[in-house]
Amino acid sequence: MDLNAIMQQARQFQERLAEIQARLGERLVSATVGGGMVEVVMDGALRVRSVRIDPEAIDPKDPAMLQDLVVAAVNEAIGRAREMGQEEMRSLTGGLQLPGIGMF
């Protein structure tokens, strides 16, 4: 196989990977827990964009409940963002699992 062709394919792969990473940074997922009491919006680069807390969820006598809801919402959003990232990566690799190539 031609080494120049392999290098060109590697460059194209890296360019497409960079495009996917940029696109994921713009795409958003959200997770709502506690019957809508806490919502977390996160981008595909796993950055939290916003947290919405219903005032009814704020009970000074039970801060642990609110903490648990926030943790649950963040973890759910992370899971959704990872799924979105994996879908994008499958489009790049044609469904192949390549070692060292993954975002999550």
Image (cartoon, grey):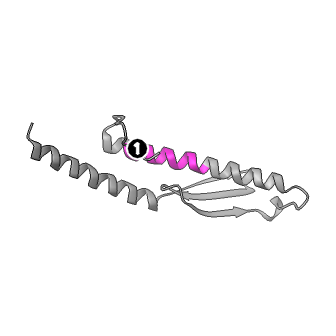
Circle 1 is placed at which residue position? 102
* Point 36% across, 34% down: residue: 97
**What residue sits 59% from the left and 59% below the top?**
41
Residue located farthest toward the left when viewing the structure as drawn: 2
Residue with the most extreme right position: 61
Magenta range: 77-89
Element type where label 1 sits in the image: loop
**Mark 1 residue crowding within 10 angstroms, few (<14) / some (14–19) / many (20+):** some
Which of the two residues, 51 or 98, is positioned nearer the viewer here? 98
Per the image, is 80 magenta?
yes
Task: Tell me what residue is drawn at x 32 percent, y 45 percent.
Answer: 92
The x, y position of residue 61, in whole percent, is 91, 58
Q: Amino acid at mark 1?
A: Gly
| Left or right of 27 on screen, residue 52 | right
Q: Is residue 15 magenta?
A: no
Q: What predominant SS class does the magenta segment belong to?
A: helix
